[in-house]
Image (cartoon, rainbow, N blue to C red):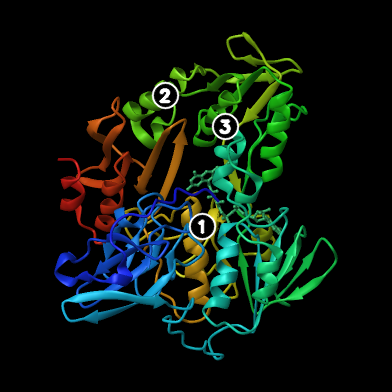
Amino acid sequence: MGSTEQKLEGPDFSEGVELDSLREGVPLLGHVGDDAAILVRTKDDVHAIGANCTHYGGPLAQGLVVGHTVRCPLHHACFDLKSGAVLGGPALNPVACYEVQRDGSRVRVSGLLPEGALTKRRPTDPGISPDSIVIVGAGPAGAVCAETLRRESYGKDIVLIGAEDPGPIDRPNLSKDYLAGSAPEEWMPLRSADFYEQQSIQFHPNDEVKSIDATAQSVTLASGKKISYGALVLATGAEPIRLPIEGANLPHVHVLRTIGDSRAIIEASKKSKRAIVIGASFIGLEAAAALRSRGLDVTIVGPESVPLARVLGDEVGAFVKKIHEDQGERFELGRKPTKITERAVVLDDGRELPCELVVMGVGVRPRVELAQQAGVQIDRGVLVDARFRTSNPHIYAIGDVARFPWPRTDAAERVRIEHFSVAERHGRAVALALIGRSLEMRDVPFFWSMHHDVTISYVGHAEKFDRVVVAGKLDERRAVVAYFDGDSVRAIATINRDDASLRAERAFETDDQAALRALLS
Ligand code: FAD
């Protein structure tokens, strides 16, 4: 995956630093030999861990320290300062953790601790945990569930079945650097088959669960295998929608969900001069930017008058539109396509937009068919409780397919959220629930989206909002944007204000509306 690793700066912690020079909760950037590290003074201790997030190399020295944790400013991955372990996605791997010794008024890093040395794990209680766990879907949710179970000492069979080749991938990158041609192939897989072998996780790539027998507690795969489960985790994600219009299935019309989809668009882009993106959604706009950076002439078609306004509001939507226009993309807004031909997209005002390539980014639907077949309750997603249990006590659902209670919404309704780190965090939370260590999932939803060189970070969840307050200057690409529902801030979007995004996450966690409003001053 991508990396923004830093040059070595600051003191060499093996030579020691004065304890008094460390401010509580403020990471100090330095190094241990040739490795960048941070030293963090907490209330009762001093910790040293690697300086770069294992997701995209984000600078943890600029992160937020909360208790014995530090959060990455880029995508909010959370690490345990005591052990380097990942406590919250999107990171999967721990950071290095060092032994720290006090020597009078100085603290000194004395050596690297072996991975996991400080993580105390109770063996799982066989009376609580199921006899075997089968996970359907090897996206981020399913993948994190499988490896968390093993890491947390679940000792019985774990089976992970994934229909998508090659297995878990960095899906957000499919519409960003990978599609633009600036991310190499090796960044894309999250895990390899070897990893699963080492973890004794039975990984079935390129296979698909075709049916569930909820009474016998077994699944049958496309390959014909039948596998019994003590608990079943549905992590089947979502699938892209194709508009029900003539020509929607023509070979030059693509959707974008899998690495195969992204590769097919890349191949098609090499033979095309003009692309039409149908849908001014996050994925549609990101795909448009990637195709534009490959030199195509790109037009985005959408029924709304301002892209992304439903999620980000009119002002931010107009700002995003301008970013794309400044790069030469055109918009046909307030328009719907009525038909796609071999050479054009026909709009509802009769105009024909010539093109050789079409990408449809018009939304996804949760993949609920298996859940339906198993007879669990469904309502625009698989309904689960705070521990991800469906209406069948042996079946769980996580990630994009699940509709779950988010404690910070007033609405009695549950939410279904399509964010990468939320899916990973569901994976971890359900794994802990399955081995009887569950805490209700209280992680605050977070996503990011890239529009050429501008990244928007969004924390919280506003199903609806009636007021948007922009603090800072969008045209200078530095702003904090609050989404209010009545008097309550429901979500915060930021541009070049990762510090504020992290503080917003913490304020949502502690239900601190005053702190959220303070971010606007
Ligand atoms: P998925 O990732 O959809 O994985 C589900 C897996 O289950 C798939 O591999 C599927 O093949 C498999 N499966 C389904 N049915 C079966 C079956 N019967 N048997 C076996 N396997 C099965 N989120 C962000 O926060 N930020 C972003 O910038 C961002 N960018 C994105 C860009 C793109 C192009 C896309 C498509 C999504 C993006 N997202 C982003 C959303 C994010 O990737 C999803 O929320 C996340 O992948 C959901 O994870 P999941 O594990 O629930 O489902």
Residue at the spot 33% in from the left edge and 71% down from the top edge: 14
Residue 150 located left or right of residue 221: left
Q: Ligand 1 within 8 A of label 3's CB?
A: yes
Q: Amino acid at mark 3?
A: Ala
Secondary structure beneath label 2: helix
Res. 239 image quadrant: top right
- Front in this rendered view, residue 469 or 97: 97
Residue at the spot 38% in from the left edge and 55% down from the top edge: 76
For label 2, the residue is 323
For label 3, the residue is 287
Looking at the image, residue 71 lies above or below residue 263: below
Between discs 2 and 3, the one toward the N terminus: 3
Q: Amino acid at mark 2?
A: Ile
Secondary structure beneath label 1: helix
Q: Nearer the viewer, mark 1 or mark 3?
A: 3
Between discs 2 and 1, the one toward the N terminus: 2
For label 1, the residue is 423
Residue 200 located left or right of residue 306: right
Residue at the spot 68% in from the left edge and 55% down from the top edge: 369
Q: Residues within 10 Å of mark 3 (few under 14, many from 20)?
A: many
Q: Is residue 69 visible?
A: yes
- Front in this rendered view, residue 291 or 133: 291
